[in-house]
Image: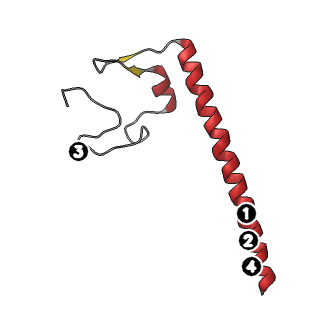
Amino acid sequence: MDGRTDIRRTKTGHKSSPEQSGLTLHKLADMRRTRVGKPRPLHDQEKLDMFRVAKKFDRLVADLERKMRAALCRLKEMLTGLD
C-alpha cells in the first residue's frame, strides 16, 4: 500500500464490511473515494442512483426472505402430517 487507506480493509489487512468500519449507507452516499484517497462529495444524481440500487436489492432480499419463510411453513406442515 502506498499510504492510502481502503475502507474495505482494516489495519491487519482483513476485509471488513462498511458497517464494521463505521460507515453507513448515508455516509457512503455522501462521499466517494478519489485517486488520492480523500473523500469528495457526490453529485445529487449519483446519490440518487446509489439509493435506487440499494432499494432494489432491499426488495430482492425481502422477497427471498418471504419465499423462504413460506417454504419453511410448508415443510413444517409436511412433517406434522407424517406423525
Lower position in the chain sequence, tag 3 or tag 1: 3
C-beta proximity under 8 Å, tags 4 and 1: no
Q: Position of residue 44 (x, y in %)?
A: 55, 13
Give the residue displayed 61% in from the left and 38% down from the top. Answer: 57
C-beta proximity under 8 Å, tags 1 and 2: yes
C-beta proximity under 8 Å, tags 4 and 2: yes
Q: Position of residue 5 (x, y in %)?
A: 27, 29
C-beta proximity under 8 Å, tags 4 and 3: no
**Disc 1 versus disc 2: distance between alpha carbons?**
6 Å
Q: What label sits on residue 79 in the rendered view?
A: 4
Seen from this angle, which residue lies furthest left?
Answer: 2
Mark 2, residue position: 75
Give the residue displayed 34% in from the left and 33% down from the top. Answer: 7
Mark 1, residue position: 71
Q: The disc labelled 4 sits on which kind of residue? A: Leu
Q: The disc labelled 3 sits on which kind of residue? A: Thr
**Disc 4 versus disc 1: distance between alpha carbons?**
12 Å
Q: Residues within 10 Å of mark 1 (few under 14, many from 20)?
A: few
Badge 4 element: helix
Q: Quadrant of residue 37?
A: top left
**Disc 3 versus disc 1: distance between alpha carbons?**
41 Å
Mark 3 vs mark 1: give the one in front: 1
Mark 2 vs mark 3: give the one in front: 2
**Disc 2 versus disc 3: distance between alpha carbons?**
44 Å
Q: Is residue 2 above or below residue 41?
A: below
